[in-house]
């Protein structure tokens, strides 16, 4: 058998060279594509900023830039977690529910108009603990019971909303009383809004986790091929649970910041965030099938969507069109990204 | 070579031995949705006998009609291994178009709406099949577009049927066994889809795509046109759901309702035994999935759970029921 294979290789040496040339061509194109995607996003961002600054002189003012940064902070924080989950090849739909539950827990344990205990920093710990528990629950149901993440997190969305509604009860709106915290998210320190500093910290930590920790590398490996990860003896299950826990804590952090920004506690504090975060991750070029993509690309995606929405509002476009613009950009981005890889035998789910 | 062959047969023997257990899971898969619906119904009947006596079942059936129609469309798309996140938005847009056009063109209006929604669905399908993009991302994008179109078409307010609404409204008012025609419309669609999936080449091809798309391509199944058809059916079902909404309420509001129906419809399809990874669907059990989704809020109040805890219970039920009815094997990869 071995002999036969060797002789076949010898006979087909011309074809092997041809294959090698083709492979190096594919590799070169792949390298170019790896660069071209973020580059095309940057170009799109630059064009957008250019057009909007020509249309409206208010667009490039310091106050509007700070406004855009404040608006993008919460989606950025949540999107870091969502990127990690999507890199696994899974999906996290529970974002808005976790935001609601965490934000409500936090405001009821802080200095609010309903009275009750004011636990100060412990409110943050307990609220993020609630998010952590929800995340671990999602992760465990997903890995141990093998329920698809789409369904687990869809259920967790409702569970989170339910927890928030139960905590909210039938009393008056809980209003934030702490003067130091009111408007903290949009206050400026060192030239940038506070919430954006938090987002930068989260992005930095996210990149660190993805690039240089075992969790991050195994996450990418699971997205590429879970079978290989498992047969290599790498801890696929614990990593999956950890990623869902990280994503939930980041959603929770987003929920607390959104509550601070809103000034009042509401179960639906996160509404609409999912429709920014997932398109942003996909527009950034992270594959929904997992394994390919990154956090910095997602950051570009979030900026693209927030700048677009901000610019359109400044240009006087009615807010009804906002979701259509986000949708159209999403469709254009995925069609653009997939166009060169079209193949009759390719399977895209 | 003969040695290898004999080894292969040896390997194949235990696989054959496993067949009955797979079949058993398949059986549970088929009756699971019905059992779960009946179990919840029995609990409700014991705790609040008055509810069942006073036509409670008819109430459940009538409130589940739009969810059922959307869930059937969703199940067809899930069956080819894709997902349609835009179908509730299409249904809502259909309802708004119906409310706007019933006055001017009367009887033609439902036909126009159904043609339009089927075309919307087909556009989704064409892009998924020919641009080869992931359906989740694509339909998330078109969801935004349809939502905006609905907002603009309705002028951001609730649209009421101005005139000629009687014919459509009769679908809700008249019925068989106290259950409105809107629900029976869903049942008819379910039976039609069941026949399509079981006995026609088209339906068989669709299931083949869901089970293994590469294999389907190599077996000369016309995967692209069948995918377009699945999405078009989802659009058509969404149009029917739009008609059911107008029949029931006489008006349609562009905000909220679309997303209010999207997740329950997906949940109904999944509770009805549809596999999210494709290839497993039974439109007839989806009926029970939709009934279960409509029953859960009623059951939670009957059991005495706080109204505020309803969405919590709802979420837990979705996870629990899918975990119970899902077919899985140990080595499979779940995403």
Image (spheres, helix red, strand yellow):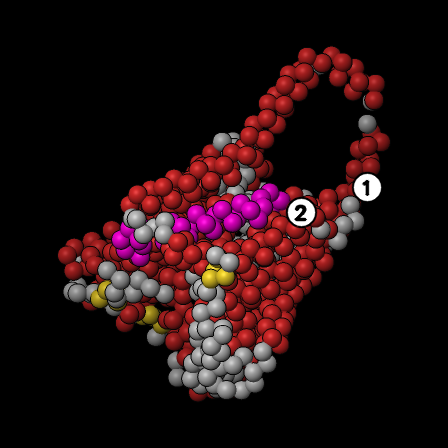
**Residue A22 on image: x %, y %:** 61, 21
Q: CA distance from mark 2 to mark 1?
A: 45 Å
Which of these two is toward me, A161 or A198?
A: A198
Which of these two is toward me, B129 or A240?
A: A240
Q: In the image, is residue B138 above or below residue A115?
A: above
Please report the residue visible at 60 percent of the width from the left and 75 percent of the height from the top. A121
Residue B255 seen in the current view: yes
Going by the image, does A12 lie left or right of B31? right
**Residue A303 on image: x %, y %:** 45, 50
Please report the residue visible at 44 percent of the width from the left and 79 percent of the height from the top. A175
Please report the residue visible at 16 percent of the width from the left and 65 percent of the height from the top. B163
Q: Which residues are magenta?
A: A290-319
Pointer 1: what residue?
A: B10
**Residue A220 on image: x %, y %:** 66, 46
Instruction: Specify the principal SS of the magenta part.
Output: helix
Chain bearing mark 1: B
Q: Is residue B288 magenta?
A: no
Pointer 2: what residue?
A: A211
Q: Secondary structure at mark 1?
A: helix
Of the 4 image quadrants, the one containing the N terminus of chain A is: top right
Residue A107 is labelled as: none
Quadrant position of residue A237: bottom right
**Residue A51 on image: x %, y %:** 33, 42
Q: Is residue A307 magenta?
A: yes
* Mark whose residue sits in front, 2 or 1: 2
Which of these two is toward me, B316 or A118?
A: A118
């Amino acid at each position: 058998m071995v002999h036969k294979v060797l002789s076949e290789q010898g006979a087909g040496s011309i074809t092997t060279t041809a294959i090698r040339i083709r492979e190096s061509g594919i590799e070169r194109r792949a390298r170019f594509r790896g660069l071209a995607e973020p580059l095309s996003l940057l170009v799109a961002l630059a064009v957008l900023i250019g057009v909007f600054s020509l249309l409206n002189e208010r667009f490039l003012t310091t106050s509007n830039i700070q406004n855009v940064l404040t608006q993008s902070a919460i989606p950025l924080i949540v999107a870091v977690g969502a990127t990690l989950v999507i890199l696994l090849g899974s999906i996290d739909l529970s974002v808005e529910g976790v935001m609601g539950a965490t934000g409500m827990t936090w405001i009821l344990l802080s200095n609010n108009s309903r009275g009750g205990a004011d636990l100060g920093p412990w409110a943050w710990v307990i609220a993020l603990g609630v998010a952590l528990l929800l995340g671990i629950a999602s992760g465990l149901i997903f890995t141990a019971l093998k329920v698809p993440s789409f369904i687990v997190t869809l259920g967790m969305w409702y569970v989170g909303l339910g927890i928030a509604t139960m905590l909210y009860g039938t009393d008056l709106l809980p209003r934030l009383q702490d003067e130091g915290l009111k408007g903290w998210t949009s206050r400026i320190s060192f030239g940038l809004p506070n919430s954006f500093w938090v987002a930068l910290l989260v992005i930095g930590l996210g990149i660190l986790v993805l690039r240089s920790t075992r969790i991050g590398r195994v996450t990418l490996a699971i997205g590429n091929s879970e079978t290989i990860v498992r047969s290599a003896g790498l801890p696929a299950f614990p990593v999956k649970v950890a990623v869902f826990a990280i994503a939930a804590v980041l959603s929770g952090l987003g929920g607390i910041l959104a509550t601070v920004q809103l000034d009042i506690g509401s179960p639906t504090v996160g509404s609409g965030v999912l429709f920014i975060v997932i398109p942003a991750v996909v527009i950034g070029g992270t594959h929904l099938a997992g394994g390919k993509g990154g956090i910095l690309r997602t950051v570009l995606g979030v900026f693209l969507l927030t700048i677009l929405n901000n610019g359109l509002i400044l240009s006087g476009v009615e807010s009804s069109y906002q979701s259509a613009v986000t949708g159209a950009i999403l469709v254009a981005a995925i069609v653009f990204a997939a166009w060169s890889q079209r193949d009759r035998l390719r399977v895209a789910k | 070579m003969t040695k290898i062959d004999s080894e292969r047969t040896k390997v194949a023997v235990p696989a054959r031995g496993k067949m009955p257990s797979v079949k058993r899971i398949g059986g549970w898969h088929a009756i699971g949705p019905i059992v779960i619906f009946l179990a919840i119904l029995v609990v409700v009947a014991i705790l609040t006998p008055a509810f069942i006596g006073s036509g409670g079942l008819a109430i459940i059936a009538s409130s589940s009609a739009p969810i059922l129609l959307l869930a059937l469309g969703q199940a067809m798309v899930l069956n080819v291994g894709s997902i349609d996140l835009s179908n509730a938005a299409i249904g809502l847009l259909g309802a708004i178009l119906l409310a706007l056009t019933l006055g001017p063109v009367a009887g033609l209006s439902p036909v126009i709406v159904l043609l339009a929604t089927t075309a919307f669905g087909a556009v989704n399908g064409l892009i998924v099949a020919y641009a080869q993009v992931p359906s989740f991302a694509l339909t998330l994008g078109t969801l935004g577009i349809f939502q905006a179109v609905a907002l603009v078409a309705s002028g951001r307010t609730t649209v009421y049927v101005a005139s000629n609404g009687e014919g459509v409204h009769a679908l809700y008012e008249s019925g068989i066994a106290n259950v409105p025609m809107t629900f029976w419309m869903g049942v008819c669609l379910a039976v039609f889809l069941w026949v399509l999936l079981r006995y026609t080449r088209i339906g068989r091809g669709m299931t083949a795509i869901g089970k293994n798309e590469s294999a389907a391509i190599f077996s000369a199944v016309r995967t692209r046109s069948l995918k377009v058809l699945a999405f078009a059916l989802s659009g058509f079902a969404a149009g029917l759901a739009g008609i059911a909404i107008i029949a029931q309420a006489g008006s349609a509001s562009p905000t909220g309702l679309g997303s209010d129906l999207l997740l329950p419809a997906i949940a109904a399809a999944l509770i009805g035994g549809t596999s999210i990874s494709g290839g497993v669907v039974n439109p007839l059990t989806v009926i029970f999935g939709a009934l279960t989704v409509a029953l859960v809020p009623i059951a939670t109040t009957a059991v005495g759970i706080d109204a505020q805890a309803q969405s919590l219970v709802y979420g837990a039920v979705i996870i629990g029921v899918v975990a119970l009815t899902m077919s899985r094997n140990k080595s499979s990869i779940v995403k």
